[in-house]
Structures are given as C-alpha cells and as structure tokens.
Image: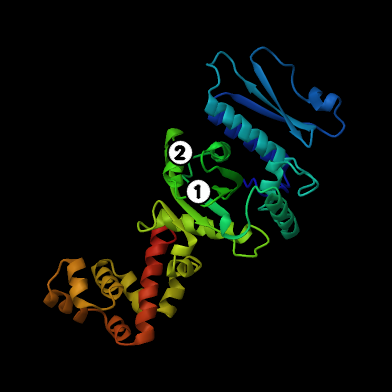
C-alpha cells in the first residue's frame, strides 16, 4: 500500500485491507464503509445501526464525508493513546484511498505534504512550492528527506501511525509525507540533536524495529522532493544492509556504494563483468574471497592486509599464489583488478540485501 499514490484504482480492496490492518492493531472488529455519491445525510445510512459498543469514526475530505470507520469496542479495555494514533492513521489512509481528484485545490498541510511525492510531476512541484511558501520546508540543503525502513512484520497502519506521531517530536519535528513499499518517508530540517536516536527510541517504545534510516537533501534549485526521497530510500537500504552505515546514513556519505546499489543482481552478468569475482563467489569456501577483498581494500598493502586477516606475511603470499589463475591474472591488471574489487563489493551488497 502506498499512501503517496493517491490514485488507488481499487478503492474497495484498499478499504478492506485498511480495515484488516486496523483490526490487527486494535484486536477488535473493524469495518470501513465508503459513502456513495448518492447517499443521504452524507452517507450515514450506509453504516449499520450504531450501538453503545460501536465507535464510528467519520472520514472527511475537503469537509465532505467520504467514509466511516466502525470499531466494535465490545467489552474490551479502553483504547490507548497509541491505538487512537492507529485509528488516525487509518483515517488518513482511507481519505487518500478514496481521493478521486488528487492534487486538486486542497491546501491543508496533510494534502500538500502527501502531494510532495505525487506521481504527477506538476502536482509535486506545486506542492513543493506551496510548502516552501508556507515555510513548512526550505528548498535545497535546508530540507532533509528521511526514509525509515521498518521490519516487514509491521502493518501499514502501524507504520503510518508511527510516521504521523513523529510530527510532534521536539525540538525538530519530522513531518510524515508518505509510505512507499513499506518505507516511512519524512521531511524536516537538518538536525545534529540526536534525531536518529530519538527515532529509534520512539520505535522501540512501540515495539517497532527500524532496520535502517537514510537521509538526503534536494539539490540546490530542485523544484520537488522526489529525487531526494528516492536517494534517502537507497541510503536506508544500505544502512540496513551494511554495518558501516548502520543505523543511519546520509546519501552524501555512500560513495561508491551508491553506484553498486543501482546494479541489478545477476550472477550470470557477474561472470562476464568479472570472471575473477565470479570464480571466487562460486567457491564453497569463501576464505579466498575474504583474503582477496581485504587485500584490495587496503590497496594491496601486505602489512595492512596481514594485520586485518591476523596472518603472517608468508601465509598471505601463500594464499595469493594459490588463487585460481583467473584471479591472479586480474590482480596483475589495473582495470581488471579495479573491476574485481567493485564486483566483490557488489556480491557483498547482494548477499546483505537477500538478492543473492
């Protein structure tokens, strides 16, 4: 489910999924009723007769009722603050799912922030300009897009509830702008005040496991937030996959890993790009691969490689001499050696992200 995609083609399916997720969060029966355009009294007749144990939460869009979320409270305990936040998230999801004219004249903060990631570039630009005019964000490095990669066991409703809750953080709020492929997307100001630790603490308090956080700022003169959000998502995936970037990394610190992250996982292509890397990858025992990768990491410095590998210089030379011929040939050729080094990092990235 993608909250930033406001053109949901199967609204009824989306509403059923929202009801299921909210029910799982509340441990109560939930039904979402859409109001048809011909329904009387704003569509209230579309819902079953209310009872003392039934909580009806209206969903409005531009002041017009579009749905109602009905929650069977039964004899259970009173709703907690976090459960009310889940209901609020379900209301937002329902409103977005039923929005038939995305990017229209809505100027409320929620609509503008959601439209920052709209599929239509003109809508994104309009939202970005409006948000800058209202000083909700500042163009260029003054704004930071944050991508929070959350464990797959957490439902979309709970992800959105968490994201919307972060708007209230102080001193630096992180405004929720979307949920894409399970990644919570936020926008806010640069912060050196422990925002990452605060996000991790808030998530832990809710029983949510954050896998990685990525940040990126729009380029100077950028007219929308799309590219920065995409870069933040890539950074979050690398923060989750690679220990040197965990738990949070800015896209500007990725270096060559950014290039590797864009490569498709294709072992067949690896054989063509670097036969030496493919030969090392194909071995059951990865000791040779670790030796070569470490050796290349330190620029073929034997002393440094021995210190990292905890081996004597004679042992390292012995290992290098016993490498497959295709690997030894690559180590003797400048371009092939550089390609081998990058390919070994690419293999490590694919393995870390489950693509190999």
Point 57% across, 48% down: residue:
186
In space, the residues marked 1 and 2 are separated at their CA atoms by: 10 Å
Q: How is the image coloured?
A: rainbow
Contact flag, marks 1 and 2 (Cβ < 8 Å): yes
Instruction: Judge by depth and name the residue closer to the eye, 83 or 130.
Output: 130
Where on the picture, by quarter, is residue 163?
top right
Q: Give above or below for 55 relative to 313.
A: above
On-image quarter of the C terminus: bottom left
The image quarter in which residue 231 lies: bottom right
Q: Secondary structure at mark 2?
A: helix
Q: Which residue is mark 2?
A: 203
Using a 10 Å C-alpha cutoff, classify the residue at mark 1 as few (fewer than 14 neighbours), some (14 to 19) or many (20 or more): many
Between disc 1 and disc 2, whose residue precedes?
A: 1
Residue 298: % across, % down: 27, 73
Q: Residues within 10 Å of mark 2 (few under 14, many from 20)?
A: some
Q: Is residue 41 above or below residue 94?
A: above
Task: Provide the secondary structure element on which disc 1 rests.
Answer: strand
Q: Residue at x 69, y 42 (%)?
A: 109
Task: Give x and y (percent) for residue 32.
Answer: 69, 30
Q: Where is residue 141, by image quadrant?
A: bottom right
Q: Nearer the viewer, residue 123 or 179?
A: 123
**Nearest the eye: 304 or 35:** 304
Position of residue 4 in the picture relative to residue 275 (left or right): right
The location of residue 321, given as percent across then percent down, is 19, 81
Q: Check the image and report above or below for 240 versus 294.
A: above
């Amino acid at each position: 489910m993608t909250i930033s995609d406001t053109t949901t083609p199967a609204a009824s399916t989306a509403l059923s999924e929202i009801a299921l997720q909210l029910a799982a969060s509340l441990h109560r029966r939930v039904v979402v009723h859409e109001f048809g355009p011909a329904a009387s009294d704003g569509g209230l007749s579309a819902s079953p007769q209310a009872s003392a144990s039934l909580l009806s939460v209206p969903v409005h869009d531009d002041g017009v009722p579009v749905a109602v979320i009905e929650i069977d409270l039964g004899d259970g305990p009173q709703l907690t603050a976090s459960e009310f936040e889940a209901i609020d998230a379900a209301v937002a999801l329902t409103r977005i799912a039923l929005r038939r004219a995305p990017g229209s004249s809505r100027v409320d903060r929620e609509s503008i922030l959601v439209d920052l990631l709209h599929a239509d570039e003109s809508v994104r630009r309009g939202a970005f300009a409006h948000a800058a005019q209202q000083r909700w964000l500042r163009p260029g490095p003054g704004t930071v897009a944050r991508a929070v990669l959350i464990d797959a066991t957490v439902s979309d409703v709970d992800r959105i509830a968490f994201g919307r809750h972060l708007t209230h953080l102080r001193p630096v709020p992180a405004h929720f702008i979307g949920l894409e492929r399970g990644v919570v997307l936020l926008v806010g100001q640069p912060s050196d005040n422990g925002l990452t630790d605060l996000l991790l603490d808030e998530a832990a308090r809710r029983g949510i496991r954050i896998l990685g956080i990525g940040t990126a700022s729009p380029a100077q003169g950028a007219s929308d937030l799309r590219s920065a959000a995409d870069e933040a998502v890539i950074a979050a995936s690398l923060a989750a996959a690679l220990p040197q970037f965990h738990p949070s990394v800015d896209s500007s610190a990725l270096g060559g890993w950014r290039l590797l992250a864009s490569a498709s996982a294709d072992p067949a292509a690896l054989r063509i790009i670097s036969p030496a890397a493919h030969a090392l990858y194909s071995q059951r025992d990865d000791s040779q691969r670790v030796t070569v990768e470490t050796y290349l990491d330190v620029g073929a410095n034997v002393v440094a490689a021995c210190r990292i590998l905890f081996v004597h210089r004679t042992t390292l030379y012995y290992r290098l001499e016993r490498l497959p011929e295709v690997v030894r040939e690559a180590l003797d050729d400048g371009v092939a050696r550089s390609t081998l080094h990058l390919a070994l990092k690419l293999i490590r990235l694919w393995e870390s992200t489950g693509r190999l």
